[in-house]
Amino acid sequence: MLTPMSTRNRILDAAERLMRTIGLARTTTKEIARAAGCSEAALYKHFSSKEELFVRVLEERLPRLGPLLEEMVAGPGERSVEENLTEIARRAALFYESSFPIAASLYAEPRLLKRHHAALRELGTGPRKPLLALSAYLRAEREAGRVRPGADTDAAAALLLGACAQRAFLHDFPGGERPEQPVEEFAAALARTVLAGIGV
């Protein structure tokens, strides 16, 4: 007999697989339940909606950006700002690279996108959450004297995460003038560049 946890994990695995292959917009809870080998009613015992499933896939199956930011906001100063920004950039680049293919299909269906945004607001999450958390981390570092007084932490957070999102977007467009930089090199260079503008 399957335990509730194993059913939940099978549902998450099936949701991730379907969202990656056919996109979030075309994935239904009925298809997820079928792929997980359970009833749609069993799916709804674990998840209230497809949007909640999407959020849980992001949180539990992709590189974990949110917990890293929360940890750094709670305890800035344990490592250098450059080391922290490098790890944030590395994790963000991998997170966006994994999540773009899942969410991209929403933009083809405006009504579904609007419904999705409303559901994310109800769940207390969304794409602004990492931006706000990174800005809060940088403010904590500014208060600790490790970021320049007066540095615009919102702009610095947007620059770092925006560059990571752009890298993920370009990841699906191979054949540019230069080969894609390995994520570790990209993250280190990005952290140094952002820090050059806000460091003490």
Image (cartoon, grey):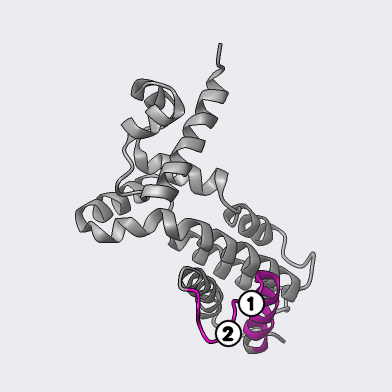
Total marks shown come to: 2
Magenta segment boundaries in residue numbering: 174-196
Q: Nearer the viewer, residue 60 or 194?
A: 60
User: Alpha-carbon neighbours of circle 2 within 10 Å: few (<14), some, or many (≥20)?
Assistant: few
Q: Nearer the viewer, residue 75 or 30?
A: 30
Considering the whole magenta stretch, tell me its main secondary structure.
helix
Q: Is residue 112 above or below residue 8?
A: below
| Residue 68 image offset from top left, x and y in percent | 65, 56
Q: Is residue 104 above or below residue 162?
A: above
At label 1, which amino acid type do we have?
Answer: Gln
Q: Is residue 148 left or right of residue 110?
A: right
Tag shown at residue 83: none
Q: Is residue 183 above or below residue 43?
A: below
- Nearer the camera: disc 2 or disc 1: 2
Q: Secondary structure at mark 1?
A: loop
Q: Which residue is mark 1?
A: 181
Quarter of the image for the N terminus: give it: top right
Instruction: Please tell me whether residue 160 belongs to the stretch shown in magenta.
Output: no
| Residue 80 image offset from top left, x and y in percent | 78, 72
Quick check: marks 2 and 1 in contact, CB under 8 Å?
Answer: yes
Is residue 119 among the parts visible in the rendering? yes
Pick out the residue farthest to the front: 175
Is residue 124 among the parts visible in the rendering? no
* Residue located 49% across and 70% down the image: 165
Q: Which residue is mark 2?
A: 178
Splitting the image into 4 quarters, where does residue 82 fall?
bottom right
Q: Secondary structure at mark 2?
A: loop
Q: CA distance from mark 2 to mark 1?
A: 8 Å
User: Alpha-carbon neighbours of circle 1 within 10 Å: few (<14), some, or many (≥20)?
Assistant: few
Q: Nearer the viewer, residue 195 or 138?
A: 195
